[in-house]
Amino acid sequence: MGLKKNLHDFKVKNKDKKWLPAFSAIHTFLFLPDETTHNGTHIKVADDLKRTMNTVIMAMVPCLIFGMFNAGYQHHLAFDGIQAVSGGFFSAEFWTLDNFLVGFWKILPLVIVSYGVGLGIEFIFAIIKGHEVEEGYLVTGMLVPLIVPIDIPLWMLAVAVVFGVVIGKEVFGGTGMNILNPALTIRAFLFFAYPTWMSGDKVWVQGAVGRDQAIAAGQNLDAVSGETILGTLAQGKEVMHSVADMFYGFIPGSIGETSTLLIVLGGLFLIFAKIGSWRIMLSSAIGAIVMGLIFNQVVDAGIVTESSKFYGLMSTPFWHHLLIGGFAFGTVFMATDPVTASQTNKGKWYYGFLVGFISILIRVFNPAYPEGVMLAILLMNVFAPTIDHYVVQGNVKKRRKRLKVKTA
Amino acid sequence: MGLLSKKDTKLITDPLADNNPITIQVLGICSALAITAELKASIVMSISVMFVLGLGNVVISLMRNIIPSKIRIIVQLTVVAALVIIVDQVLKAFAYELSKTLSVFVGLIITNCIIMGRFEAFALANGPWKSFLDGIGNSLGYGVILIIVGFFRELLGSGTLLGFPVLGDPIAKTGLYAFGYENNGFMLLSPMALIVVGIIIWVQRTRNKALVEDH
């Protein structure tokens, strides 16, 4: 009688209890359950929903750890005037324990609140519905802390998670039935509900908002700011960061989205694990490049001049758009969400292309919403079923035609 | 018994809950989304609709036997339009600021589906007293939802109720704001009105399973 057997017996004994879904969720998370399907054809495959979700989380862990270091680095850079990183990705100035701890103590509570509140709601809904707990929140819970600014108040995050999970997912029927990506629903909620905490030049550096309040309270301190590159460009100012910084991620931004290098590595991992769709990632990058090139051409042709308020972002070299802002993170980890993306292979190309295309369009033309990729993915989530419908209908039509030719 | 017979009472109480024009018949949604960012606007809008629908129902009911059925929609529109113009002018004369907030939506009461719906469904087939009660009942049902939505949107969005700061002063950081609470700007945008109406529909149908449509 091992522990495993005991747990199974416990489950059988209590199978009518209301709280059982909560127990089995933890049980199946830790052990392979004893239940097997008894009839019908079944294929045994190792990657069930939990394993799939865990793979995505693994792909995100480097971004999370980098985010912790970067939070501390940005903080010290703005407050203490330390030396900027100069020696490439593995610079010793960046990977210090001090940097890590500053970020760790700010980001750990975000992760705990995100998982605590989100899984709490999943458990409550599972018990009400009498279903097994759905694992859908595992990835969302990790995505959420990565796409918010470091200083976001915890209660705001909790409110947004409640909104995103209940309105974005549970009302549609839970995991696998949602139309919108829950993590982006949560971010969009925060963005529209508390814009002062989600944009501007203060929220990206840990402590900058607090410093502002101290100054307002009459203390004699220097104001601290750290604008994202998109924010700087939207105002037509000069960008202070080198392209290498943008690629490695030594820039201010939401916690996990700054390092394009680690995101690309995570994306490759997802592609090789056959979890993320390379079609969506590739076509979305193509879409962004096409839109970026169009803007560059418009500037080169002299149609838009420096006096225009769009000049800063339009004249940005097209490939910079792939490195700055949340584009890379959104494309790799959120546009590829198998539930809300297009399901057909052909549809994925259209879907991805439009995500990239619209991201850059919103980014350039609406400085009030610098993070175009969030809105672009949400918009395309809504259109994904329509795209699939036309792809499938097109296929049916083509085959019908072929049938006619054959029989005629 | 008293003033109203049992059947007449039902005309008023039914639309308040189980036959609510917004949450059950899903009519008049546009104005519910547009003007509910403030509680005051919701209340004035409800009263305006009550005036138009109550009187309109009586007028149509009185004329129901002489309106040729081919042109009845035009006749109904004329009646609503006349009543709406009265409301609009009264608001402009006595509550100018508010009429600016409500702006075009007072005029758009003309196109509020609840009004035409009640004319068609009830006033054309019933006597004036019953039609009056039906009009009042339906506009109360409309008003209840508007006021609930307006209450939550103003409270959570601006921290005020009818313009009074009930949660403290967000700039001086008193009351709830001293603890770091902030107003939810999303509540002031129309999508949130839709979501609040959706939550009301959800709660209502969870309490009374008979209302759930099976598709």
Image (cartoon, coloured by chain):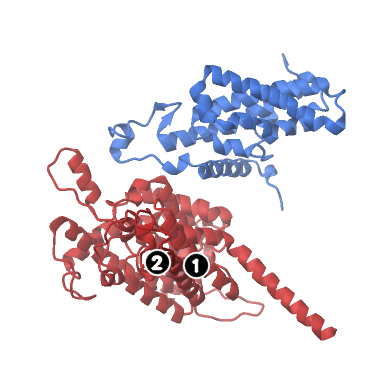
Q: Residues within 10 Å of mark 2 (few under 14, many from 20)?
A: few
Q: Residues within 10 Å of mark 1 (few under 14, many from 20)?
A: some
Above or below residue B142? Residue A319 is: below
Judging by the rendered image, the residue that carries numbered circle 1 is A337
- The location of residue B115, given as percent across then percent down, is 70, 31
Query: Which of the numbered marks, if any, corresponds to residue A203?
Result: none
Question: Picture quarter containing residue B75?
Answer: top right
Front residue (pair A38, A406) = A406
Q: Is B22 left or right of A189, judged from the image as shown? A: right
Question: Which color has been applied to chain B in this rendered view?
Answer: blue
Query: Which of the numbered marks, if any, corresponds to residue A300?
Result: 2
Res A181 visible: no
Q: Identify the residue shown where x is 29% and y is 32%.
A: B174
Q: Is A394 left or right of A322, judged from the image as shown? A: right
Q: Element type at marker 2?
A: helix
- The location of residue A215, given as percent across then percent down, is 18, 42
Number of numbered discs on residues: 2
- Tags 2 and 1 both on a single chain: yes
Q: Given the image, on which type of amino acid does mark 1 rest?
A: Asp
Q: Given the image, on which type of amino acid does mark 2 rest?
A: Asp
- The location of residue A20, given as percent across then percent down, is 51, 60
Q: Identify the residue shown where x is 24% and y is 63%.
A: A240
Q: Identify the residue shown where x is 58% and y is 32%.
A: B104
Judging by colour alone, the chain drawn in red in this rendered image is: A
